[in-house]
Image (tube, coloured by chain):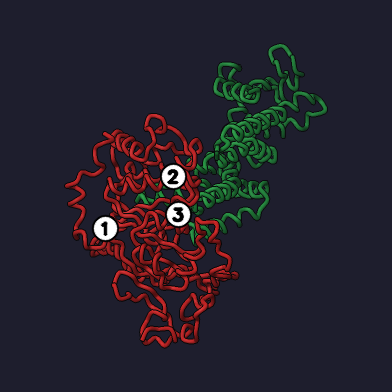
Chain colours: A red, B green
Amino acid sequence: MADAPLHADPAAASRDRGGPLQPLLIVRGLTKHFPIRSGLMGRRTGVVQAVDDLSFDVMKGEVLGVVGESGCGKSTMARLLMQILKADRHELIFDGDPLGHTGITTAELRRQMQMVFQDSHASLNPRMTIADCIGFARRMRGEPRNMVAAKVDDLLERVGLTPAQYRHRYPHELSGGQRQRVNIARALALEPRLLILDEAVSALDKSIEAQILNLLNSLKAELKLTYVFISHDLNVVEYISDRMMVMYLGRIVEIGPVDQVYGDPKHPYTRALLASKPSHDPRKRTLVPPITGDPPNPINPPSGCRFRTRCEFAEGVCGQMAPTLKPLDNGDHSVACLMQQPGSGHSRAPI
Amino acid sequence: MTAMGISALIVMLAIAAPYVTDGQPYSGNALERLKPIGTHGHLLGTDELGRDMWTRLVYGARLSLISGAAPVLIALAIGGSLGVIAGYAGGRVNALIMRTMDIFYAFPAVLLAIAACAVLGPGLLSTIAALSIVFTPSIVRITETATTRIRGMDYIEAARCSGATDFRIILHQVLPNVQAPVLVYASSLAGLSIILAAGLSFLGLGMSPPNPEWGQMLNSLRQSIYVQPWVAALPGLMIFVTSVCFNVISDGLRVAMDVQDG
């Protein structure tokens, strides 16, 4: 049972509609502004631009790492993609099918796309057994009890928990790492093709984190999964990702293959972020803080480039013009910085 | 355990009333009025119309238990649903339901019960209705608070991701987590409900004579308190013991249902 593939290959092949070159998920113009209401009448006194006009593709079989400081909109983005939060404006195309009445429904999207939450404790219902938690989605879709039970055992086995031992336990009887395994099993229950991992390993001990990362890697290979891996841990993202996306204050500042972004970061924010990563060599201490201050308040983000208030290269033009994400010469690597855009008016821009 | 035992005894006596008494709570002998406790043939004495106190107390347990339990159950059904809906939906729905409940909250409980009873007229059903109205707002509030706390939890979001309908999420994910505090609170209301029901009858707004309701019995025996103080105190003792027992059980329930958060 455990050795049988989760979805047989022909089925997986039939679910793959657009071929390997078709992005699994295309996101265009994803925007979410939270109004701030105050006073007795709930007047709108401001807007938090949590996620502002995100556009990116997730290719089939890749791991797209998403990094950024806390509050930059990573988790909001995950919830918007899962349709838990309603986006103000967005266009989602899942394997060629647009979300909406001409393409796939929200229910179908959620079958193909699932999410693993950061807090392994809060994301499991304390009143449900492990088996009930994992089997919930399938039970709710009307599958008979015995079929769901077999499926649950298979999933437990896959995430490295002995079914007989854990099936009837409650979440509080498990350790953090075990709970996160259960969360992964739960997310896999509907046989999705895309997993959104929202800080899925951030709350774990380093040793457990490594185990879970290895588990994710092997699950990805076995089940032909695609991941959107959200994390603030640059080492983890470098380890697991194929491409990475750097977010700052609700916008994408840089996106590209991991080796290119790590090897040759183009955006000053990415550079600062990477420089803040402690070196493994104690003789190479970072003595000068690569970036100072807190991100500006997203209620009133700076005009133009949102990073200009902390950027050492900021010039007048940065406040007048918002840089858009533009591909560099090689095409894969895109960056939103006026310094990389010819004719932008920035003194460091290429001619 | 003692409280459970006494409560169970009262419930059993109420059910078996025709078998443990002479079965005639309404008929009395005018010649045997206000006999003291221990009189031959009338173990607990007789009331001001010569009716056997034991019989009337046991039959009274039926009415008192119903007027104690029914309003709580009704308020639990109505208030629990409203509270879960308000907490789960949030926003405008929440504001509408909670502000309406706040209006009821603005009145003292007894005043509200008296007003409702006065409007509905005396009788068992109007007592139950009045007390249900009194208890509903507080149950709504407890349920709403518990639901709001749970609504933002990741496991509810995960359940929404799984594509389950709101109704099923409420049924399978929300209710098991809100039931403990709500049930504990509701059980503590049962004792209060008995007291309030008796109080309403005592004021002449609940059950009317000759129904053997404890509060109403207390009222009619009030004039005889100088003649037979112990007999006159018996209905009050029953009210006291029953509501204390219910409260102790409620406390036990609180301990037993304590959520294991690990």
Marker disc for residue A9: none
Q: Earlier in the sequence, mark 1 or mark 2?
A: 1
Confirm whether circles 3 and 1 share one chain. Answer: yes
Circles 2 and 3 on the same subunit: yes
Q: Is residue B250 left or right of residue B231?
A: left
Position of the N terminus of chain A by quadrant: top left
Residue A325 in the image, given as x and y percentages of width and height: 36, 75
Quarter of the figure with residue A82? bottom left
Residue type beneath disc 3: Glu
State the mark number for residue A199: 3
Q: Residues within 10 Å of mark 3 (few under 14, many from 20)?
A: many
Q: Can you name the residue that lies furthest to the top here?
A: B40
Chain of the residue where label 3 is placed in the rendered structure: A
Q: Marks 2 and 3, Cα distance to the nearest angstrom?
A: 11 Å
Inter-mark Cα distance, 3 to 1: 21 Å
Q: Amino acid at mark 1?
A: Lys
- Give the secondary structure at mark 2: helix
Mark sitting earlier along the chain (2/3): 2
| Residue A46, horizontal then vertical, whole percent | 53, 74
User: In the rendering, which numbered label is found on residue A60?
Assistant: 1
Label 1's element? loop
Q: How many marks?
A: 3
Depth check: give the residue in front, A214 or B127.
Answer: A214
Q: Secondary structure at mark 3?
A: loop
Instruction: Determine the residue positioned at 75% across, 27% down.
Output: B232
Locate the C terminus of chain A and report the quarter of the image it occupies.
Answer: bottom left
Q: Residue at x 54, y 50 (%)?
A: B149
Q: On the image, numbered disc 2 is attached to which residue?
A: A180
For mark 1, does the 10 Å Cα neighbourhood hold few (<14), some (14 to 19), or many (20 or more) residues? many
Pointer 1 and pointer 2: residues touching (CB < 8 Å)? Answer: no
Q: Is residue A133 left or right of residue B83?
A: left
Which of B153 and A53 lies nearest the eye of the viewer? A53
